[in-house]
Amino acid sequence: MLNTALKVLSKDGSIADNSYQMISEDAVLPHGDVVLTTAQLDQLVNIQGKKALYITVDDSPEVNEYPLSQLDTIFIEFAGFNDGRGYSFAALLRRQGYQGELRATGDIFKDVLNYLKRSGFDTFVIKEGKDIQEAAAGLNDFKYPYQASTGVAQAHYQTGA
């Protein structure tokens, strides 16, 4: 589950504190920005701050309908490096019209950031034990993608740049 104490890396390379809090085990709704699990979506109307949803591999947006227009951020959990469903979830949410922030969390590290950006992610919670500064420095390792993607509407060669 989400470690809310970790820093958040943005696709522009900036690093910020996480402002989201989870509902505690005693089901007390915190003040401010709150991230809900899919089982807690009924609490959405009670949140005063920013509203976020935490999606795991069991919560596919292909078979579940989410109130996308009411959410500021959607956290997508990557349970392991070898599980690519989170990339598909991000692309699907973008195709469904979600314009808010997509945040990758879980097994996230420098080597996967380019793929996450191309799939439509805006922010990343780097895996505990990995260097966030190193990850930030690697965000621009690939500047000119050859293929178009969810995150890049036209490839470099198509723009004439």
Image (cartoon, rainbow, N blue to C red):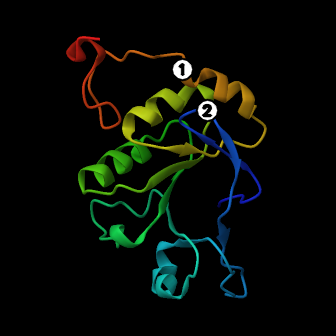
Image location of residue 40, percent across then percent down: 51, 81
27 or 103, nearer to the observer:
103
Q: Quadrant of the C terminus?
A: top left
Disc 1 crowd rating (10 Å Cα; few below 14, some 14-19, many 20+) is some
Image location of residue 143, percent across then percent down: 45, 17
Judged from the image, the secondary structure of the residue bearing numbered disc 2 is: loop
Judged from the image, the secondary structure of the residue bearing numbered disc 1 is: helix
Relative to residue 93, is residue 39 drawn left or right? Answer: right
Q: Which residue is drawn at 49% across and 60% down?
A: 73
Residue holding disc 2: 13
Image location of residue 34, percent across then percent down: 60, 72
Report if the CB atoms under discs 1 and 2 are less than 8 Å apart: yes
Q: Earlier in the sequence, mark 1 or mark 2?
A: 2
Q: Which residue is drawn at 69% across and 81% down?
A: 30
Q: What residue type is labelled 1?
A: Asn
Relative to residue 36, is residue 59 drawn left or right? Answer: left
Figure quadrant of residue 158:
top left
Disc 2 crowd rating (10 Å Cα; few below 14, some 14-19, many 20+) is some
Question: Is 146 placed above or below 94 here?
Answer: above
Q: Which amino acid does label 2 sit on?
A: Gly
Q: Point out the residue furthest to the front here.
A: 161
Question: Is 130 placed above or below 101 here?
Answer: above
Residue holding disc 1: 140
Q: How far apart are marks 1 and 2 (CA)?
A: 9 Å
19 or 28, nearer to the observer:
19
Question: Is 85 placed above or below 47 here?
Answer: above
